[in-house]
Image: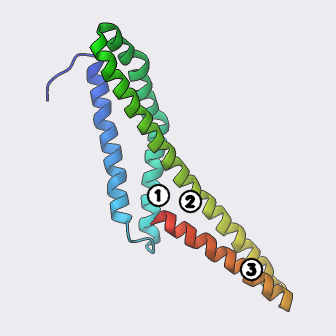
């Protein structure tokens, strides 16, 4: 690999780090795919995705800011031909941001589903602690139907 002067060397080194973090996340997803019933593997996959999310929130955001605030303006000043390249790179950054948002929304959805499952679990426990009546059986049925709907959506999202 050729040697680059600063600040290019740092930016290129950051690219390699970003590639490695994304590769780890992709490996984790591939390993977990089709194994949603394996709680340990699923938890490890989600943890790796959360690591990616945290990396994107801090490190990738700083990296993109360096490029957009320092490197790209310098390219624009150098020549009008570079302006077209900069526009393309900015569009690619926008796509990265869109993908980051999609990841954040998916992880938030998984968190939300866990909160909903916990709420229904507590409701089920509360109802089971009381004496059984026709009304409580009806309520238990509603709780279980809601729990089923939440879990089915959650499993679909995870898988």
Please determine whether, in this image, residue 136 is positioned above or below residue 60.
below
Specify which label sits upstream in the sequence, 3 or 1. Answer: 1
Please determine whether, in this image, residue 99 is positioned above or below residue 107.
above
Label 2 close to label 1 by CB (< 8 Å): yes
Please determine whether, in this image, residue 79 is positioned above or below residue 23.
above
- Please give the name of the residue rendered at 48% of the width and 34% of the height, measured from the top-left corner: 58
* Place of residue 71 in the rendered image (x, y in percent of width and height, measured from the top left): 35, 17
Instruction: Give the quadrant of residue 55.
Output: top left
Specify which label sits upstream in the sequence, 2 or 1. Answer: 1
Residue at the disc numbered 1: 46
Label 3 close to label 1 by CB (< 8 Å): no
Q: Nearer the viewer, residue 113 or 9?
A: 113
User: What label sits on residue 142 in the rendered view?
Assistant: 3
Q: Secondary structure at mark 2?
A: helix
User: What label sits on residue 110 in the rendered view?
Assistant: 2
Q: Nearer the viewer, mark 2 or mark 1?
A: 2
Dot 2 surroundings within 10 Å: few (below 14), some, or many (20 or more)? some
Q: Secondary structure at mark 3?
A: helix
* Place of residue 56 in the rendered image (x, y in percent of width and height, measured from the top left): 45, 39
């Amino acid at each position: 690999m050729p040697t680059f002067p600063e600040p290019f060397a740092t930016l290129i080194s950051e690219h390699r780090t970003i590639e490695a973090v994304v590769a780890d996340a992709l490996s984790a997803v591939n390993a977990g795919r089709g194994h949603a019933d394996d709680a340990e593997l699923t938890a490890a996959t989600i943890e790796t995705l959360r690591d990616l999310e945290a990396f994107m929130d801090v490190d990738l955001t700083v990296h993109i800011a360096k490029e957009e605030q320092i490197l790209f303006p310098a390219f624009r000043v150098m020549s009008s031909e570079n302006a077209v390249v900069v526009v393309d790179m900015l569009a690619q950054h926008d796509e990265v941001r869109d993908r980051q948002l999609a990841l954040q929304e998916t992880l938030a959805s998984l968190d939300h589903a866990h909160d909903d499952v916990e709420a229904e679990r507590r409701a089920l426990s509360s109802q089971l602690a009381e004496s059984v009546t026709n009304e409580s059986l009806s309520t238990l049925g509603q709780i279980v139907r809601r729990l089923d709907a939440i879990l089915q959506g959650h499993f679909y999202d995870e898988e």
